[in-house]
Image (tube, helix red, strand yellow):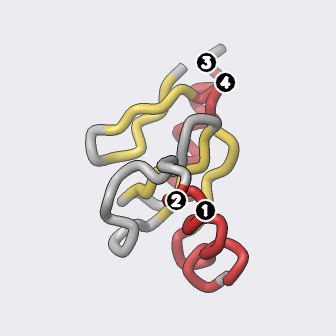
Amino acid sequence: MYVHIGADVVLRTEDLVAILDARLVRASEANQQFLQRAAAAGLLRGHNLAGARSVVVTTRGVYPSPISAVTLARRALAGLRAL
């Protein structure tokens, strides 16, 4: 199944690793280092991290999303239940 994370981005639910609240990511030094390393490795997809409400980590990259983490988690779970 697939989950739409906003900004015309659709991801496979099988690839999802984590859906994080962007406020918590911004508040944590460890998460900031993770994002810097992802960007340095070319795995940070999208450009609007400042306006993101959530950060989606997949096996293929890290995606900022304008949709809240709770809504994305609901969408992902709904897709998994459909299987």
Mark 4 in CB contact with mark 2 (< 8 angstroms)? no
Amino acid under disc 1: Arg
Instruction: Identify the image quadrant of residue 48.
Output: bottom left
- Across and down, in percent, residue 13 comes to 59, 29
Marks 3, 2: nearer the viewer = 2
Q: Which mark is drawn over residue 40? A: 2
Task: Tell me: residue 36, above or below residue 72.
Answer: below
Image disc number at residue 82: 3
> On the image, numbered disc 1 is attached to which residue?
37
| Residue at horizontal 67 percent and vertical 49 percent from the top | 18
Tell me the distance, in whole angstroms, between the alpha carbons under discs 4 and 3.
4 Å
Q: Is residue 64 left or right of residue 81?
A: left
Mark 3 Cα shell of 10 Å, populated few (<14), some (14-19), many (≥20): few
Given contact means CB atoms under 8 Å apart, are the residues at marks 4 and 3 in contact?
A: yes
The residue at 60%/49% (across/down) is: 57
The residue closer to the viewer here, 55 or 77, is 55
